[in-house]
Amino acid sequence: MSLPLSCFSVTLGPTFTPLVVVELTSDAKREAVEWLLSRIRDQQQAGGAELLVEQLAPAVGAQEKENPNVFVVGASRQRLLSGAEEVGLFKEFSDGSMRTFTCSNKHNFRDFEGDGDSFLSMAECQFIIKHELDTLRAKDETHVPGYAQVKLYPGKSIGTTFPLGLFVTSWIFLTLLSPDDIRHYYGEGLAFYFGFLEYFTFALAPMALIGVPYYLFDWEDYDKYVLFAVFNLIWCTVILEFWKRCSASLAYRWGTLSRKKAFEEPRPGFHGVLGFNPVTGREEPLYPNAKRHLRIYLVSLPFVLLCLYLSLYVMMVYFQMEGWALNVHDEEPTFWTGVLLFIPSVIYAVVIEVMNLIYRYAAEFLTEWENHRLESSYQNHLVLKVLVFNFFNCFASLFYIAFAMQDMVLLRQSLATLLITSQILNQFMEAFLPYWLQRRRNKKMIHKVQRRRTLEDREFPLAEQVRLEAEMSTYLGTFDDYLEQFLLFGYVSLFSCVYPLAAVLVLLNNVTEVYSDAFKMCRVFKRPFSDPAANIGVWQLAFEAMSVIAVVTNFALIGLSPQVKAYFPESDTQLILWTVAIEHGLLAFKFILTFLIPDVPKHIQIKLSRLEFQSLEALKKKVEQRLLDASPAL
Amino acid sequence: MSLPLSCFSVTLGPTFTPLVVVELTSDAKREAVEWLLSRIRDQQQAGGAELLVEQLAPAVGAQEKENPNVFVVGASRQRLLSGAEEVGLFKEFSDGSMRTFTCSNKHNFRDFEGDGDSFLSMAECQFIIKHELDTLRAKDETHVPGYAQVKLYPGKSIGTTFPLGLFVTSWIFLTLLSPDDIRHYYGEGLAFYFGFLEYFTFALAPMALIGVPYYLFDWEDYDKYVLFAVFNLIWCTVILEFWKRCSASLAYRWGTLSRKKAFEEPRPGFHGVLGFNPVTGREEPLYPNAKRHLRIYLVSLPFVLLCLYLSLYVMMVYFQMEGWALNVHDEEPTFWTGVLLFIPSVIYAVVIEVMNLIYRYAAEFLTEWENHRLESSYQNHLVLKVLVFNFFNCFASLFYIAFAMQDMVLLRQSLATLLITSQILNQFMEAFLPYWLQRRRNKKMIHKVQRRRTLEDREFPLAEQVRLEAEMSTYLGTFDDYLEQFLLFGYVSLFSCVYPLAAVLVLLNNVTEVYSDAFKMCRVFKRPFSDPAANIGVWQLAFEAMSVIAVVTNFALIGLSPQVKAYFPESDTQLILWTVAIEHGLLAFKFILTFLIPDVPKHIQIKLSRLEFQSLEALKKKVEQRLLDASPAL
């Protein structure tokens, strides 16, 4: 399925390396398609993209309803390099610093050898072509030829563009690679996810190491957890702070740390009355902020609160059912009442999953309806909605058991059950179920392919590969993967002191997670476009919020422990006051620590400020020179 | 004393507007002085500053030991404009946006009329000249002529430069002016202080308005303060958030919001082994970070903690003395025992003031000894040290009374006493005492001046004005002014619910503070150089930290109130748990609010991103053009 490309270029039409596939709807008018192709092929002087594009060989059998409007796009090496300059790519300079790439001094960049064939990574090439195609659409046409009613404005998408995932030879291979290699194939966004996953997995090791003896020797003596809770607190603050430094190092090496963000165009789904953007002065749909705020605060917020209430209500029903089942079992214990004991948990687990699913759709619908102009703001609002609900759904019952019922044995049991089932469910739902569905769908395709191969042996690979990949699901971004890690982090940091094995379980899960995620990326989904991220974005904030909540829960657990209670035999008030005072002190310390540990490692800071200093000096010299040149004229 | 300048330029030597005074030590060698003067006068092509400089007319009577090495420096209008470009000044463009000033399109800037005489403010002109003099010293000389042993490196100061404060005609005038006018005379740093002072004074109005009826009608019913505490909480969060927006507006209007910071040179007191700066590659003293950290954590931090402990100890002694005095008075009350009651407070107040003073010197010494490379980092460390100790000294006794003794009547009394005495002391120490000392010192000077005037009538004003101002104290920055406001903010936000009149007192204080500060700036101190600040810096953080502490203290006070206690008659535990839970919720809400309220107002954000978009577009066009030009050659 993944042969090296050189074969194709001989056997198949394209005389260039195909990088991106453009697929238009099969009923697109001929003149519109031709207009688009000519725009892609046109010289840059003429406003075109100057890319290479060729139609994919159409299907042989006319009886098959295949989309004829599938095109592969590539570019000459020269075009890619000039595109890299336009995009503002950062590359390693010969002196070891990262600088914006320019064609004029390309030979001063470290990895530029010969013609620069291997200078740009596959992900970068695809990103450049996507960028060119995107900015192509953002020109001054007012409508698509053949579709007079289809108005064009910057950022409106005409077809679907997706990159061609050709170069990963084996999925197991990926997992042995460093984030640097993943970045080479999939770009920075995904590389950051894998980097974080690996970092988090390593960071779990000390927790797991300490957790095992706790589990082995103090199993019944669960009031010994004070020390563990304190360790837990320090651990989650420190690992997040160091991840920031680690992330800055990665972003610097990948050239995204100081890269200027391009101006964000409105997202495809955004609609409104056509007007003039106050920033760009271009014509584009406008939607008043006040209206959006009304939608957020009067509809979305109450909806989220209602869902939280519903989730709380379901939880209370679950506890009542459990109590009732326990009663029945206690009155007259038989085999069937023993089975009955498990039924509430099973029902609750299923209901939670269903609620999560429904809520997810509702959240996407609502966030879409809020009509955010930018993809980033859409993502932030969606993440916030889903995060709050998932947090609540996963942890509300644990909070209730810990602080309302104060039953540490039950807490430990629930934690273990929830953790293990959610891990198994996740791995299954996330990778293997989609893969299985995929296979079923693709079986027909492969059959067809094989049948056709017997007919015309020479025409096979690229066209079929493209059509196969077109059938694959679209990867919706790292959202679900981060969400899963976020919840796992919650299990470890919030309550693990009552169940020290949690860290071990999460560690084991993450080791397999790396494999299943890699598998998912290679086999289940279309290869996503690279996303030049400089950090893990809103998730850093989410993890930090969780670690603050962890301080509070851990202190509450410490306050509840019989061991601590023994120190204040005369009054609970004293105990609580001391716990609260120390907790406040620790929270303050945590914030101070966040300030004290610099977010960017020293050596990178020096490199960055050296570059900044040099550009300031250059600017000063230029100004001085200009003033000197101009002075006779003054 | 402050005649318009036009008189001088006729009667006195200088044919230019004198802007800055350069004073060298009186025993400076002649060749060094001449070298410096020639460097200042030289053309820019020759590496000079191209400024106008003239020696101040020497004293007439030879018997007077006046420093002959006093020079006035000015510049041609053209030179000032080109200096403005070099410094990177932001000015209002004709389309209403703020842009970096360039000489080539100077006529497109809004306030540029005719020759541009009034285009630059006095503070800006002085800042430009200071910048020119500073960068002049940063050239490649290795030592000062005549002083072979005095090595030169960038930023090392040779003499003392201070600006000439000539144009403020009357100090009362200043207080009627807006921060914009203050900025015109004193630059952004001080304008921000006055802006903040005015904002804070206005923001106190609602607190004062609500406080008065509380004071009038509920004086004895001090458990009614729950509502007031809640109002207090919201108030201090909201005013700080809105100040940020207000500050961004000011900074935008003043052109400092998006102005690039120049590379910071090492501060004058910085010393170390000569080496090469890793950022600039220049030769300058280096001092290892690790050594500085050792000094901070092993000496400064323990010292601060020791001082805090000492302060705590003094406080406990005070409470014991007070208890003892009360005992004596209760046993056998006479007039003298009545007087005795006041003695502990007086002693404590005096001891606190003395401790503050000694500590301040120690903190300055330690921070100097820590040997920070940058002035900003020196300032931050000094502010932190002084802040913590002052906070402790001022509020520790109040905390003790409120939470250890839980005596609300005493708390109110102490708060009132502390607030009123500190206000009176401050105003006196800050403006009137230095003024009085100044007058005593200057009396002789003025006598001399008058005596001389009778001798030679035409030679008087500028030279004497300069010598008078040289005698004035140096203004050490806004540190003490902000510190005072910080402590006042503490009195209002931390405990004002038990003494609602606090806001009224602080309001009254601040109304007079504006006047005394203006008086101080005009009459007591040398005119300071402008400091192109974009916000109030570390003080924003300090005020925000105080508002977080205010949430905690207010909730503790609410928890202690008999009114709330009445809701939980059966158990204190329930009361405390609820208080703590709500407090945590409110803290979370406060943080969310900080995120939700954007720091920069929408209309300024749009202007900023418009500018950024335009520069991105221009860059893109330039790159594209260059690539097109180069393409035949490729």
Image (spheres, coloured by chain):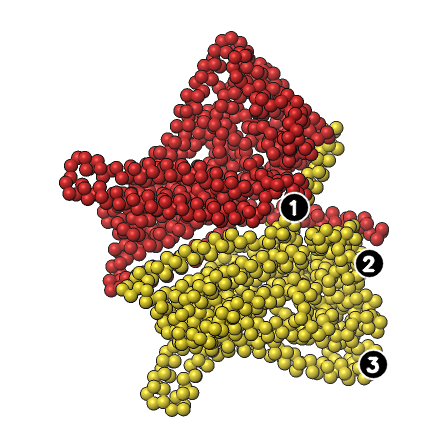
Chain colours: A yellow, B red
Disc 2 crowd rating (10 Å Cα; few below 14, some 14-19, many 20+) is few
Disc 1 crowd rating (10 Å Cα; few below 14, some 14-19, many 20+) is some
* Image mark for residue A456: 3
Disc 3 crowd rating (10 Å Cα; few below 14, some 14-19, many 20+) is few
Residue B277 higher or lower than B453, as above or below: below
Mark whose residue sits in front, 2 or 1: 1
Q: Where residue B476 sits in the image (x, y, percent)? A: 48, 33
Helix, strand or loop at mark 1: loop
Mark whose residue sits in front, 3 or 1: 1
Residue kind at label 3, given as amino acid type: Glu
Q: Give the left or right position of residue B303, taking residue B626 as reference.
A: left
Q: Chain of mark 1?
A: B
Q: Is residue A481 shown to the viewer in this render?
A: yes
Q: Which residue is mark 2?
A: A115
* Residue at 47% in and 11% down: B451
Report how far apart the C-alphas of labels 2 and 1 lie in the structure: 33 Å
Report how far apart the C-alphas of labels 3 and 1 lie in the structure: 65 Å
Q: Chain of mark 2?
A: A
Q: Between residues A189 and B271, which one lies in front from this camera angle?
A: B271
Report how far apart the C-alphas of labels 2 and 3 lie in the structure: 37 Å
Q: Where residue B162 sits in the image (x, y, percent)? A: 55, 28
Q: Is residue B198 shown to the viewer in this render?
A: no
> Dividing the image into 4 quarters, which one contains the C terminus of chain A?
top right
* Image mark for residue B10: none
